[in-house]
């Protein structure tokens, strides 16, 4: 799989809508590779990603049902809520567990679970072989917009459309991986996911297929992210 991250002509406004100015120029990625173990609910989720000299801009749009959101603290189990995820590896993958990636997991209320993972060996209990929890001060540098309330304690069973949008500054990535190459030289990899583990209709889907259906944390299945 390959996705082209286009250069934004002007800084996109996070709250300007799916087809707002600048956003309409972005390529669309579909998260439609669903795990067999999921329920019969298969929501449509699309993503747009843009960049400029300050960082990257990401927007998800979800045509969903059974929406729930109860986690309000960083690094809690937001993936059990209605959740969108972007796993990003800015430096080339190296065999043997090198070349870390960022897992931006965000529920519909805008709360994040965010690590920098260098050894993705799953140890149980949400732990990995080697990872760093992103400090709240660094999380605060990521600007976020969400259309749903901060919490949705009672599951919304009827159809509902919701969006997430955020901006991650280059300085955030560089704190962990060092200076970024100029866009034409970047060889990023990543995956985009949708999940809702703790709802009445759990589901798991990705943009780049994971075969067989297993944990999202498998960089060998990441797709290419090409900077225009």
Image (cartoon, rainbow, N blue to C red):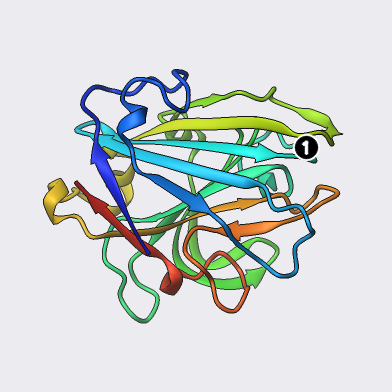
Residue closest to the eye, 210 or 91: 210
Q: Is residue 201 above or below residue 213?
A: above
Q: Residue at x 33, y 50 (%)?
A: 176
Q: Residues within 10 Å of mark 1 (few under 14, many from 20)?
A: many
**In the picture, residue 55 is in which quadrant?**
top left
The answer to whether residue 114 of the structure is visible from this angle is no
Q: Please name whichever residue, 191 or 117, is drawn nearer the observer in this view of the structure.
A: 191
Considering depth in this image, is 64 or 135 the residue closer to the camera?
A: 64
In this view, the residue in front, 160 or 219, is 160
Residue for point 78% across, 29% down: 152
Q: Position of residue 48 (x, y in %)?
A: 41, 40
Residue lying at 53% horizontally and 71% vertically, measured from the top left: 210
How far across and how far down the image is residue 199, in percent?
A: 81, 47
Q: Position of residue 206 (x, y in %)?
A: 55, 59
In the image, what residue occupies the spot 51% across and 43% down?
46
On the rendered image, what quadrant is the N terminus found in? bottom left
143 vs 37: above or below: above
Which residue is disc 1 drawn over? 68
- Left or right: where 106 falls relative to 102: right
Please, is residue 212 above or below residue 32 in the view?
A: below
Question: Percent from the top left, x then y, of residue 30?
Answer: 49, 51
Q: Is residue 98 above or below residue 46?
A: below
Q: How many marks?
A: 1
- Left or right placement of residue 145 versus residue 100 in this view: right
Res. 143 image quadrant: top left
Visible residue check, residue 172: yes
Snapshot quadrant of residue 16: top left
Horizontal relation, residue 212 to residue 174: left or right: right
**Local secondary structure at mark 1:** strand
């Amino acid at each position: 799989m390959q996705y082209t991250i286009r250069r934004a002509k002007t800084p996109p406004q996070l709250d300007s809508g799916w087809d707002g100015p600048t956003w309409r120029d972005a390529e669309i990625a579909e998260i439609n590779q669903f795990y067999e173990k999921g329920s019969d609910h298969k929501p449509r989720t699309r993503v747009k990603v843009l960049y400029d000299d300050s960082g990257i801009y990401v927007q998800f749009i979800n045509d969903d049902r059974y929406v729930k959101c109860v986690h309000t603290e960083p690094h809690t189990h937001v993936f059990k809520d209605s959740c969108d995820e972007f796993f990003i590896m800015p430096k080339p993958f190296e065999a043997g567990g090198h070349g870390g990636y960022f897992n931006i997991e965000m529920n519909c209320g805008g709360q994040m679970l965010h690590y920098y993972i260098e050894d993705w060996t799953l140890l149980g209990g949400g732990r990995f072989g080697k990872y760093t929890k992103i400090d709240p001060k660094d999380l605060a540098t990521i600007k976020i917009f969400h259309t749903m309330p901060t919490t949705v304690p009672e599951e919304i069973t009827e159809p509902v459309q919701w969006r997430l949008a955020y901006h991650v500054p280059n300085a955030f990535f560089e704190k962990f991986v060092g200076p970024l190459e100029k866009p034409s030289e970047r060889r990023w990899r990543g995956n985009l996911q949708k999940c809702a583990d703790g709802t009445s209709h759990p589901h798991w889907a990705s943009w780049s297929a994971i075969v067989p259906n297993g944990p999202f944390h498998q960089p060998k299945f990441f797709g290419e992210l090409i900077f225009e």
